[in-house]
């Protein structure tokens, strides 16, 4: 009798569940493409985007379905960015600084040598109203709307090479340094005495192993994540460039969203970017510590040597900007002035709030 009652009860429950309405399908899909591993522990992009996904889907009650594809699963950066412009198959993309400059030319100014003195200044600058205004013309130029800036593998780069440890600018002379297909990076390397060699990211390890290039520069986190110590012997944390990942969304897709959904995406992106800053610094410190265990020698460039390199590279870099941008190069002077203002303000606030 009890068994019969249980069967009847299960049948009623099943009918009740069957009568319940099915979950509504999402009205919008936001597919995000990036090159980093999907691993939540060895890069800042994957966990930041996971947090973004949770925030957006929760705030819209699942009406925006966020789908994240890492490891270049949806193609290289250029291909993914081109598809994002249309907003049909990919709605959002993460781009390294070289590719970003190809879609928004003003961004080449951000690759200025020794632009930022520290992480605090870099983060405050990228999250500032000035930089938001700087990025606004990208919509018209490329069809991409700016969401935020992440620190590519940790931001401040380190040299790695097979020939010798870099302690001074003289040690760079003649080294074939791999660069992105980015004229700004080439100009900086030439100014410092190296021989810049453009090479796609996917060919870097082979290029190092075969001697096509002697070295490269990436943030220590990148060196560790991709085990670049397997094909290089020496590393120097120089910080001569601050590598970034620019996060954008298709303007064609974004503009069709309800206004409240646009706000949700923007506020969620800002929180995800803030989270990524902290993760990136953790990864870069871990990457540097691991580097010093696995490279033959490691070295942190002294402040005095950074100043020497800055004095050599920045005037050459500005001359190149004038050649490339003409009168528009004045924007670079405004940019540097804003970085200086932010740094001064941050340092002043520390004194006022904690030391006085």
Image (tube, rainbow, N blue to C red):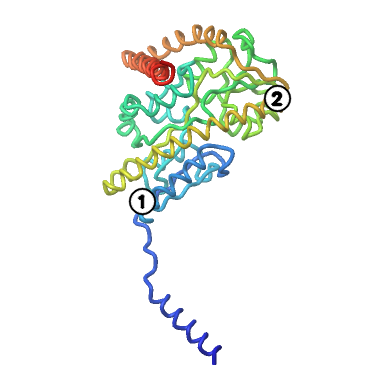
Alpha carbon separation for disc pair 1 and 2: 46 Å
Where is the C terminus found, in terms of image quarters? top left
Comparing 315 with 278, the one in front is 278
Which residue shows up at 69% across the image and 23% down it?
A: 211
257 relative to 278, above or below: below
Q: Position of residue 344 (x, y in %)?
A: 39, 15
Q: Residue furthest left?
A: 259
Q: Hey, which quadrant is residue 13 in on the image? A: bottom left
Earlier in the chain: of badge 1 and badge 2, it is 1
172 relative to 179, above or below: above
Comparing 253 with 356, the one in front is 356
- Read off the residue under disc 1: 59
Can residue 121 be seen at all in this image of the molecule? yes
Left or right, 129 with respect to 286, comes to left
For the residue carrying disc 2, how many other residues have a C-alpha within 10 Å: few (<14), some (14-19), or many (20+)? some
Secondary structure, mark 2, is: loop
354 relative to 23, above or below: above
Number of the label disc, if any, that sits on residue 295 = 2
Which mark's residue is nearer the viewer, 1 or 2? 1
Comparing 280 with 192, the one in front is 280
Q: Position of residue 75 (x, y in %)?
A: 51, 42
Number of the label disc, if any, that sits on residue 120 = none
Mark 1–mark 2 CB contact (< 8 Å): no
Q: Hey, which quadrant is residue 320 in on the image? A: top left
Q: Residue furthest right?
A: 296
For the residue carrying disc 1, how many other residues have a C-alpha within 10 Å: few (<14), some (14-19), or many (20+)? some
Q: Residue furthest bottom?
A: 1
Which residue shows up at 63% across the image and 19% down it?
A: 236
Which residue shows up at 39% across the image and 37% down it?
A: 270
């Amino acid at each position: 009798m009890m068994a019969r009652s249980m069967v009847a009860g299960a049948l009623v429950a099943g009918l009740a569940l069957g009568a319940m309405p099915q979950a509504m399908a999402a009205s919008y899909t936001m597919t995000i493409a990036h090159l980093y591993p999907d691993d939540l522990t060895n890069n800042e992009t994957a966990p930041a985007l996971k947090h973004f996904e949770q925030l957006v889907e929760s705030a819209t009650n699942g009406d925006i379905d966020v789908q994240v594809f890492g490891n270049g699963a949806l193609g290289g950066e250029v291909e993914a960015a081109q598809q994002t412009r249309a907003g049909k198959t990919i709605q959002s993309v993460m781009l390294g600084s070289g590719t970003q400059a190809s879609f928004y030319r003003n961004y080449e100014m951000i690759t200025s040598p020794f632009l930022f003195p520290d992480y605090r200044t870099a983060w405050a600058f990228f999250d500032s109203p000035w930089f938001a205004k700087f990025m606004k013309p990208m919509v018209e130029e490329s069809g991409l709307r700016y969401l935020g800036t992440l620190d590519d593998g940790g931001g401040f780069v380190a040299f790695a090479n097979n020939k010798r440890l870099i302690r001074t600018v003289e040690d760079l002379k003649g080294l074939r340094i791999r660069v992105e297909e980015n004229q700004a990076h080439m100009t900086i390397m030439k100014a410092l005495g190296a021989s810049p060699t453009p090479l796609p990211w996917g060919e870097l390890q082979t290029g190092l192993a075969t001697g096509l290039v002697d070295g490269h520069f990436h943030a220590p986190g990148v060196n560790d994540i991709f085990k670049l110590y397997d094909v290089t012997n020496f590393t120097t944390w120089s910080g001569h460039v601050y590598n970034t990942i620019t996060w954008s969304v298709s303007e064609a897709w974004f503009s069709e969203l309800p206004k409240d959904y646009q706000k949700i995406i923007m506020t969620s992106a800002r929180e995800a970017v803030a989270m990524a800053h902290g993760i990136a610094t953790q990864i870069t410190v871990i990457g540097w510590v691991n580097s010093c265990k696995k490279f033959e020698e490691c070295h942190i460039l002294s402040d005095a040597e950074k100043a020497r390199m800055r004095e050599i590279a920045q005037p050459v870099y500005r001359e190149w900007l004038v050649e490339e941008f003409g009168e528009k190069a004045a924007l670079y002077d405004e940019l540097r002035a804003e970085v200086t203002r932010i740094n001064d303000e941050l340092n002043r606030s520390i004194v006022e709030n904690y030391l006085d």
